[in-house]
């Protein structure tokens, strides 16, 4: 595309964005959303769809999960975040649903991350080069042994209809997210549960573990745009924040941590909103945000450590042509972040 035309488009987007944000801020009525998007099936009494009264026995959290990542996902595609929340709150009961049964918990003699194990796999790839290759020694099995593996244990994600998150394994503990937004720490040998953490949305991104002194951080994003750092031993939240203001943001990509800086790639669901013919397409831009792992800040006092890169689609936002200053990222020896982009992945 001709550069001046791209700049013109970016300038236009800058002009229309405030108007669109204002429209997104108006709170929809749950009843109106129900009538527009749900009543045709759930009030009909003829199809396979449960009645409205049956939906009212489910928790709002469960209904929201069904819209976000369950059987109603395709129907909910054009619905904005606020509309999903409004209809789930209208129909559903309060509360989160049941806690895991106490029998699922690990006994005191199986402490978290206590196994001496070479087999570490953190994030999307076992090594920073992103090849997803692991040597026989590290994996603890040969290629020939793969065909002879047997099931040791299985764990069900309560209420979910899909399991889609990549597991991270460190020192005998497995960390994995789920469609219900529950992140769990499981014993890799027995499948017993150390802790669970409830995120605001489905967690698909591969979880990354990072050590600073005696502390171990877990970092990951969710499908409604929140990014989290937990204490890996207790599962307690250290901090959580949004890296993009756009209501359709989703964080699917695995983060990368380098030198105490977390690089967070952001994508969106905006193409699904465009099924609605009245949707004023398109306002989301892909981005990579650099955060301090200790507190989630985008502190830019030291610009060589904390850079905010807005890289995809809009050339005026690319801040990557100053070769004198190192940029955070990988591979280590080059200190470059390699990112590829598609508007919605
Ligand atoms: C085109 C028809 C149709 C529309 C429109 C529709 N649904 Fe459904 N819904 C169904 C059917 C059919 C099922 C049963 C699916 C099954 O059991 O596999 C269902 C099941 C559900 C369930 C139960 C899921 C579960 O996990 O048991 C919830 C909750 C739900 N719908 C909410 C909604 C909401 C909220 C809306 C509006 C935003 C909506 N549906 C719009 C057809 C529809």
Image (spheres, rainbow, N blue to C red):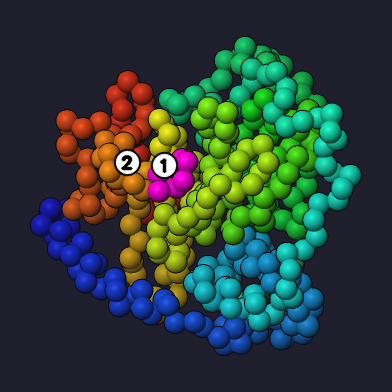
Quarter of image, res 262: top left
Residue shown at the point (17%, 30%) measured from the top left:
324
Residue shown at the point (36%, 25%) measured from the top left:
331
> Whole-percent x and y of residue 192?
81, 37
Estimate the spatial distance between the alpha carbons at disc 2 and disc 1, rounded to whole Å: 8 Å
Say which of 299 and 55 sits in front.
299
Q: Main secondary structure of the magenta part?
A: loop
The crowd level at tag 2 (other Cα within 10 Å; few <14, some 14-19, many 20+) is: many
Quarter of image, res 257: top left
Outermost residue on the right side: it is: 103
Per the image, is 99 magenta?
Answer: no
87 with respect to 316 (left or right):
right
Q: Which residue is mark 2?
A: 306
- Label 1 lies in ligand 1 vicinity (Cβ under 8 Å): no
96 with respect to 267 (left or right):
right
> Whole-percent x and y of residue 87?
62, 78
Element class at badge 2? loop
159 with respect to 285 (left or right):
right
Q: How many marks?
A: 2
Mark found first going from the N terminus, 2 or 1: 1
Q: Which residue is mark 1?
A: 292
Residue shown at the point (21%, 32%) measured from the top left:
325
Element class at badge 1? strand
- Which stretch did the figure color magenta? 291-297
> Whole-percent x and y of residue 280?
34, 74
């Amino acid at each position: 595309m001709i550069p001046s035309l791209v700049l013109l488009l970016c300038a236009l987007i800058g002009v229309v964005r405030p108007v669109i944000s204002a429209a997104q801020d108006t709170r929809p009525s749950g009843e109106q959303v129900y009538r527009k998007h749900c009543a045709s099936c759930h009030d009909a009494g003829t199809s396979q769809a449960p009645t409205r009264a049956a939906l009212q026995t489910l928790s709002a959290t469960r209904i929201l999960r069904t819209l976000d990542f369950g059987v109603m996902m395709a129907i909910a595609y054009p619905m904005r975040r606020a509309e999903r929340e409004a209809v789930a709150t209208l129909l559903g009961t309060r509360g989160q649903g049941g806690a895991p049964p106490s029998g699922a918990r690990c006994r005191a003699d199986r402490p978290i991350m206590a196994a001496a194990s070479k087999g570490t796999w953190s994030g999307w790839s076992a090594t920073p080069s992103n090849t997803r290759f692991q040597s026989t020694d590290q994996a603890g099995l040969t290629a020939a042994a793969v065909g002879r593996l047997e099931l040791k244990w299985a764990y069900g994600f309560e209420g979910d209809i899909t399991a889609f998150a990549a597991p991270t394994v460190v020192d005998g503990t497995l960390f994995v997210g789920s469609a219900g937004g529950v992140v769990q720490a499981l014993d890799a040998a027995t499948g017993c549960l150390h802790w669970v953490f409830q995120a605001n949305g489905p967690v698909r991104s591969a979880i990354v573990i990072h050590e600073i002194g005696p502390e171990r951080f877990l970092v990951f994003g969710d499908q409604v745009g929140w990014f989290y750092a937990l204490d890996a031993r207790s599962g307690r939240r250290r901090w959580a924040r949004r890296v993009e203001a756009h209501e359709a943001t989703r964080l699917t990509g695995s983060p990368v941590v380098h030198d105490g800086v977390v690089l967070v790639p952001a994508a969106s669901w905006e193409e699904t909103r465009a099924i609605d013919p009245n949707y004023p397409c398109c306002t989301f831009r892909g981005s990579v945000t650099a955060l301090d792992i200790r507190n989630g800040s985008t502190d830019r006092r030291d610009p060589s450590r904390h850079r905010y890169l807005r890289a995809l689609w809009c050339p005026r936002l690319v801040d990557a042509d100053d070769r004198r200053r190192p940029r955070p990222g990988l591979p280590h020896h080059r200190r470059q972040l390699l990112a590829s982009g598609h508007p919605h992945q």
